[in-house]
Image (spheres, helix red, strand yellow):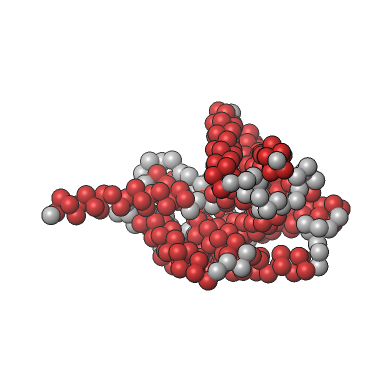
Amino acid sequence: MAHLVNALHLAEVPLVLFAQRAFHPTMAFTALAPFLFAVSRRALAIELLLVFCVADLSNLVIKWVIAGNRPYWVDPEVWQFPMTCEGGWGMPSGHMQAFSTVTYFIIFRTRAHKAWFMPHGAMCALGAYSRVYTGSHFPSQTLAGWALGLTFGFFGSRLFECLDASQQLHRGTRLLRISYLGSLIGVLGIMVFGVHAALELAGLDPLTSLPLARGACRTGKVVGLIWEGTAKVFGVLIGTAAVAVLQWPCSKDAPALAQGVLHRWTSVAGLMTAHHLLLDRFATSAAAYNDGPDGPTTLLSCAAIGYLNVVLAAGLACLLQLLLQPAKQA
Ligand SMILES: O=P(O)(O)OC[C@H]1O[C@@H](O)[C@H](O)[C@@H](O)[C@@H]1O
């Protein structure tokens, strides 16, 4: 009996570790937005990416201001996994905030049926549990991340509803879209670098989380370095602005890509796989040029990874739509 129970416990670990990957903030632009592009929900994908970028950069800045410890820094007995060794501050959880922002945004924006709240709540609970289990966060940090994500998701969806009602952004002129998105990038840049400079002036270095993490991490290999994540998010932001401003040949949301459920979904699956393969190749070759965690080449390749994720996903979805057009008309 004891063997059986132990085997069951060991089987739980891969599930928890899988949840870590599934709830990573990068999933918003490596999987979720590409999926939305692939199923022709282009406008929703662009909105989701913008809300995600605002939420993720806000998470970074809030972490700097609060400067909360992580459990594995405080207690050397905490069980560590490679992904435990996050290099940034712990309050609030970035994983939980990003996941709950993008998923609540989709739920509110599409006015999804109330029944979705139940499985969604279970997923949030699994995400929070996995972050606590790996010693990355205290429970209160995951709860704060979840609550902030709910707030960003809700107000993000309301904002885009208002813009819809006033026929802005998606249907507005190119100049209007450029000025909206340019201002957003400027405001977020000022927020991140302004708060960083203000804290340094006050004698509080926001990057002191790194030595704390390095000191506590048993493998010595810290993940989620501060400027790498930020560079990726700015890359995503610029890529999303490019996709929103440029008129792709197939810029309208088409209700159906091709006839037949099987045809449609195998095409989407193929597109998603192609996207990941292309991006993995690029990420691997970019990593070969790394010049240290905060080196300019690393940061530039991180920004390029973020940018290409969005632009490639939108471009591939567009190509797929064009290729399938004759099948639809036939
Ligand atoms: O706070 P958490 O849940 O450990 O999340 C950390 C992550 O937070 C995100 O905001 C960053 O973009 C990532 O680079 C980082 O890994």
Write the residue at 70% across / 51% down.
Answer: 254
For the view shown, which residue lies furthest in the bottom direction? 114
Q: Position of residue 127 (x, y in %)?
A: 43, 58
Write the residue at 30% across / 52% down.
Answer: 12
- Residue nearest the observer in this picture, 210 or 243: 243
Q: Position of residue 165 (x, y in %)?
A: 78, 69
**Residue 170 sits in which quadrant?**
bottom right
- In the rendered image, which quarter contains the N terminus? bottom left
Residue 144 seen in this snapshot: no
**Total numbered circles:** 0
**Residue 277 sits in which quadrant?**
top right
Q: Is residue 7 left or right of residue 264?
A: left
Write the residue at 79% across / 58% down.
Answer: 169
- Residue nearest the observer in this picture, 259 or 38: 259
Q: Position of residue 120 (x, y in %)?
A: 48, 64
- Residue nearest the observer in this picture, 101 or 44: 44
Q: Is residue 247 left or right of residue 225?
A: right
- Residue nearest the observer in this picture, 80 or 170: 170
Q: Position of residue 135 (x, y in %)?
A: 38, 55
**Residue 164 sits in which quadrant?**
bottom right
For the view shown, which residue lies furthest in the left direction? 1
Write the residue at 81% across / 55% down.
Answer: 177
